[in-house]
Amino acid sequence: MADEPTRLRDYGLQSERLLWPTKGPSRFEEELGLEEMERALGLTTLEKAVRWAQTKSMWPDTFGLACCAIEMMSIVGSRYDLARFGMEAFRSSPRQADLLIVSGRVANKMAEPLRQIYDQMLEPKWVIAMGACASSGGMFNNYTILQGVDRIVPVDIYVPFCPPRPEALMEGIIRLHEAHLAGVPPAYERVGVAT
Amino acid sequence: MTSIASSPARRPIVAEPQYDGSRIPSRVPTILDVPEELRSSEDVLQVNFGPNHPSTHGVLRLIVDLHGEEVVGVSAVIGYLHTGFEKSMESKTYWKCVTYPERIDYVGYQNNELVYVLAVEQLLGLEVPAKATWMRMLLCELNRIHSHLVFLGTSALELGAISMFWYCFRERETILDLFELVTGQRMHTRYFQVGGLAEDIPQGFFAECRKFVEWMPHALDDYRGILDRNQIWLERTKGIGVLSAEDAIALGQTGPNLRASGVDWDLRRDQTYLAYDQVDFQVPVYPNGDVYDRYRVRMEEMAESTKIVRQCLDKLERMEGLPWIADDRKVVLPPREELHTSMESLIHHFKIVTEGFRVPAGEIYVAVESPRGEAGCYLVSDGGPKPWRIHFRAPSFVALEATATCLHRALVADLIAVVGSLDAVMGDTDR
Amino acid sequence: MTDWSALPGYVSHRDGPEMPTVTVETERLREACTHARDELGFAMCVDVVATDYLGWAGKGVSGYIGTASGRDMMHPADQGLQVLPAPKPKRFSVSYHLLALRSGAASIAGKAGDARPKGGGAPRVRLQCWVDDGEHVPSVVSVWPTCDWHEREQYDLMGIVFDDHPNLARILMTDDWEGHPLRKDYPIGGEPVRFSDEQ
């Protein structure tokens, strides 16, 4: 009969379950067992799922400047294997990178390219200031070294030491992953990009 | 930004070729100019190999003019890592300055420490005990192996032999473990002090070092197995980036770059320092001056360094219990136990740490053979506790001056190979 | 022994522990370098260094001179007390460290080994010339092409102008930097940090 609503959209609904309250469990649910459902499938919000995916493959940009770059190269090596975190693919183009590990002292001449690289990265993007020189100028308090890279880019994680052990850098990376999983926004949302 | 390579104003030619056949560009020795016939052509593309680029050399910027795939103009812009070491060290006492030279050449760091410490000791006229000398030699040779491993890993990575990176860094981790065992720190060890070493050699180091020395020749065989008969490697490195002997000398090259061009010159043998005259080693020299020869020189230097380390171990194992630092309390900190009992030690400690020991007035230039070439330290002292002027002769600075000469008729892919083979570390270049 | 007085523009020389230092007149520097390269065999210029002596001999240097032999009690006035370092002729010295590729005397003095060079002549020498602020130094790029970047660096950091240099531009600092950082009247820069009031 034409005046009886037969299509879901006539009711404004999108799921048959609400329309058909007496429908039993679906075939899929029967196979799994109703109580197994939550255990067999991961149920999560979309944001958490996206964050999980971002964390597991956060690709760094090749931004090795000085001594810390050598230690950064050694975490890609086979002893301190960064590939287990899905991060061994160091992208040379900042447009493909998520993470900028500023490893080394930043001279005033290099500050402008650093900012350009940061601007070219697409959101979401994170910055790790690796080493004492990137975090605060390190042992160089003079006319040419930027006293901390957070003067020009917002920084998420500071990794101290000169140079940090590979394990220290990985601790920093893992903390960044955990922070992101927990919902901490990247630094540019907290601090403002044009800092 | 005006482009240096193709600026219209020509300055008079002042650098005549030293001899027929020189490939040093004649207007400016370090800039390859686009040839006349191509200057107005629309086919020449100027590309910026910016300070951030994938070949892991740090922040070198090359402004390259390309005619198709061929490099017709190149000029290097450096200074992106200028740290002001020399100015910073002028405001620190000599003892505190030791942490600075290491970070200049951050891959061959013990050699920079060594050259600084030797310069200060020479001005002081200080006698260093034999144990310290041999240990310094051992660590510098381990550092040479370390530096060549980094060179090999990164250069091979850039040319596409990616697995070399992991092989080389595996051995590098063992060397860094040895450094950590002795000094407590993987890189930038600050182990060399004015007068000797900071601390005695710990137990167990000799056994570990022997294990490494026994293993290293097998590792070198692994590398040779991967690269030496690899046709792609050979084609990408043989005949590429040729630097003749006369050009190399005119451009001030030293170290493996010079030896690969056929000049038999090694500071360890020819102007010997530490105890290199008491160890037996060969100096590899290859005639062609191309990328392949530089690679061969560094490979063989690793083997020779392993031999030197073995001889140092033999000597050091018989030096148990000997002093590791000079006894001069005016310069060297007294041992901590003495501070509890002796008043003079306390005063010396206080004076050295706060005011610093004073170095007699004079100027000196000391050079050592670092993995990159001749690393030198020019020190002017006014008699006070801080250096008046200190300058480090950086082998990488000079190596990069040869890029324009080596890239005569090169392709873009060769540019990468050549810059990698010159083994320039940007911290060393920019200081 | 090498006869340094044959160098054009020779002023004086002084033997040092690791190499002799020969002072030449600034105007005749290029001839001296050409002579050193061609006649005396110094094929390689290893380094070019400029030193700023502003403030040298301004304040006395006193205190204990740390040498292995300590202070000689018989001559207290020469060491230890307020001693002014000997004044320098002009403000800047420009030193050219030259190397002749012949083995011989150890570069570090006091090492065991034959002190006489095997190839004949000293293997290393420092040619030095003196200039005041504003005076120019002839460039030796035509003698040793490696001096290109060394001279640029000393121009950049010390402000010494080299005449006839084909490309005298700043090399380590940015192109628009003002001032020459390594001069003694240029501040170290940086920022004040707490507790860093050392003298």
Image: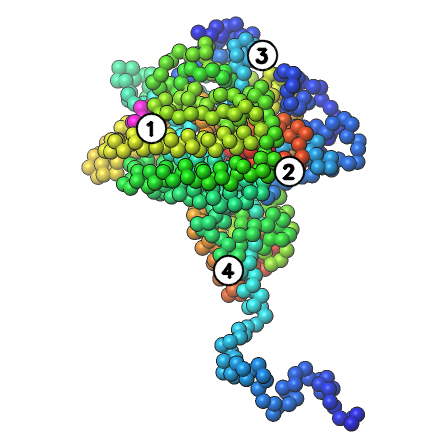
**Nearer the camera: disc 3 or disc 2:** 2
Q: CA distance from mark 2 to mark 1?
A: 43 Å
The quarter of the picture where the N terminus of chain C appears is top left
x 66%, y 28%: residue: B408
| Frontmost residue, B357 versus B137 | B137
Q: Which residue is mark 4?
A: A177
Is circle 2 on the same chain as circle 1?
Answer: yes
Q: Nearer the viewer, residue B20 or A120?
A: B20
Quarter holding residue A14 = bottom right
Near mark 1 (Cα within 10 A), the count class, few <14, some 14-19 or many ≥20, is: many
Q: Is residue C57 magenta?
A: no
Element at label 1: helix
Q: Residue under circle 2? A: B413
Residue at 58% x, 83% y is: A27
Given the image, on which type of amino acid does mark 4 rest?
His
Residue A21: x percent and y percent?
61, 90
Alpha carbon separation for disc pair 3 and 2: 38 Å
Mark 3 is surrounded, within 10 Å at the Cα level, by few (under 14), some (14 to 19) or many (20 or more) other residues, namely many
Q: Which residue is mark 1?
A: B133
